[in-house]
């Protein structure tokens, strides 16, 4: 069977919470310092997928494959060039500013680097409380109680609200970022390389936390990552991106057991095997 094929799908899947259809994001043409004209370039090209309520779709690929651009375009943190995104039946790309602001309470993002996503001068409680107040969910003592519950839910203490980000470890800072996202009670969370900056032990702890939160809250995740070993632990389905396009999409178990696309096979061949006695052959993807 040829490597160049349509992604695998399942016609029996439930109705999507998030639906992405023919999404494209093209960087504008630009002129260099010395006057050379650089053509417009598509970072994401004709990407389509659905995410069912309560599932985790992993979007994987190497750096520059378009994963992060896709996630941010879905939330309209950047504006797509074309395509359609619907959330619970609402056309996200058609919304004006105020309806979009209201919808964003239901759609949140956790970024890769909590060092840059958390204001180093802002106390943790203030950071978590910002979204609660911005969306007019609560104020005063009620907002304080929500902050305390959010911190405790991610494994921190209510008293940590008075501390600054530099007083926490990297894993704890990422827990704070998760608490901040969940404090506004979203239904859908984009996790943009949310564990890639953490060491292996802390990665496992944060993944376990994310899965527990998903069970407790019924959350839906778009899990953006480059590490297929990490993805295997959390994903319901996996979409593989290569140069801005999805080249394979399948249930996680199916994709790991029998990848169809050569690029997917190459990515899987790079996943380390914990048993040093097992010799694994590395596949080099030649783009054909």
Image (cartoon, helix red, strand yellow):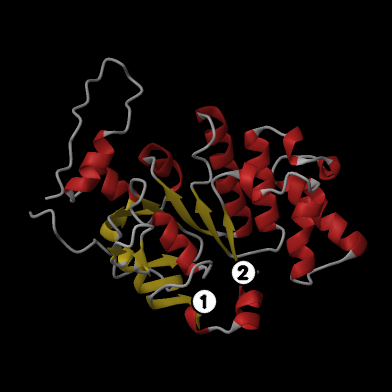
Residue to which mark 1 is pinned? 88
Which residue is depicted at the point 28% across and 66% down?
39
Choose the circle earlier in sequence order: 1 or 2.
1
Q: Quadrant of the N terminus?
A: bottom left
Q: How far apart are marks 1 and 2 (CA)?
A: 10 Å
Contact? badges 1 and 2 (CB < 8 Å): yes
Which quadrant of the figure has residue 57?
bottom left
Q: Does 192 sit above or below residue 35?
A: above
User: Counting other residues with Cα less than 10 Å from the Cα at mark 1, is it few (<14), some (14-19), or many (20 or more)?
Assistant: few
| Residue found farthest to the front | 34
Which residue is depicted at the point 54% across and 28% down?
201
Which residue is depicted at the point 79% across and 58% down?
129
Q: Position of residue 114 (x, y in %)?
A: 62, 44
In the rendered view, does 67 fall on the left or right side of 187? left
In the rendered view, does 219 fall on the left or right side of 139? left
User: Counting other residues with Cα less than 10 Å from the Cα at mark 2, is it few (<14), some (14-19), or many (20 or more)?
Assistant: some
Q: Position of residue 203 (x, y in %)?
A: 53, 35
In the rendered view, does 126 fall on the left or right side of 205? right
Which quadrant of the figure has residue 185?
bottom right
Q: Position of residue 256 (x, y in %)?
A: 28, 43
| Residue found farthest to the right | 141
The local secondary structure at tag 1 comes to: loop
Residue to which mark 2 is pinned? 106
Which residue is depicted at the point 52% across and 41% down?
195
1 or 47, nearer to the observer: 47
The local secondary structure at tag 2 comes to: loop
| Residue found farthest to the left | 1
Instruction: Answer whether residue 31 is visible to the viewer in this image.
Output: yes
């Amino acid at each position: 069977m040829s490597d160049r094929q349509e992604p695998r799908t399942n016609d029996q899947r439930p109705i999507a919470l998030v639906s992405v259809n023919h999404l494209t994001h093209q960087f504008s043409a630009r002129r260099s310092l010395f006057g050379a004209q650089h053509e417009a370039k598509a970072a994401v090209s004709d990407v389509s997928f659905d995410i069912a309520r309560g599932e985790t779709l992993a979007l994987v690929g190497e750096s520059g494959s378009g994963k992060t651009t896709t996630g941010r375009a879905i939330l309209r943190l950047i504006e797509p060039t074309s395509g359609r995104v619907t959330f619970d039946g609402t056309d996200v790309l058609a919304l004006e500013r105020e309806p979009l602001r209201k919808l964003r309470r239901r759609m949140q993002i956790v970024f890769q680097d909590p060092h840059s996503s958390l204001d180093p001068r802002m106390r943790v409680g203030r950071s978590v409380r910002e979204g609660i107040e911005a969306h007019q969910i609560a104020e005063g003592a009620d907002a304080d109680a929500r902050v305390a519950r959010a911190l405790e839910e991610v494994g921190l203490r209510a008293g940590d609200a008075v501390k600054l980000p530099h007083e926490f470890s990297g894993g704890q800072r990422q827990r704070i970022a998760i608490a901040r996202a969940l404090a506004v009670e979203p239904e859908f969370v984009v996790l943009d390389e949310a564990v890639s900056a953490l060491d292996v032990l802390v990665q496992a702890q944060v993944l376990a936390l994310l899965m527990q939160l998903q069970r407790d809250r019924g959350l839906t995740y778009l899990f953006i990552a480059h590490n297929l070993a990490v993805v295997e632990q959390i994903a319901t389905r996996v979409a593989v991106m290569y140069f801005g396009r999805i080249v394979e999409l399948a249930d996680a178990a199916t994709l790991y057991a029998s990848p169809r696309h050569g690029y997917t096979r190459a990515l899987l061949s790079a996943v380390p095997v914990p048993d040093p006695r097992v010799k694994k052959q590395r596949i080099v993807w030649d783009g054909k």
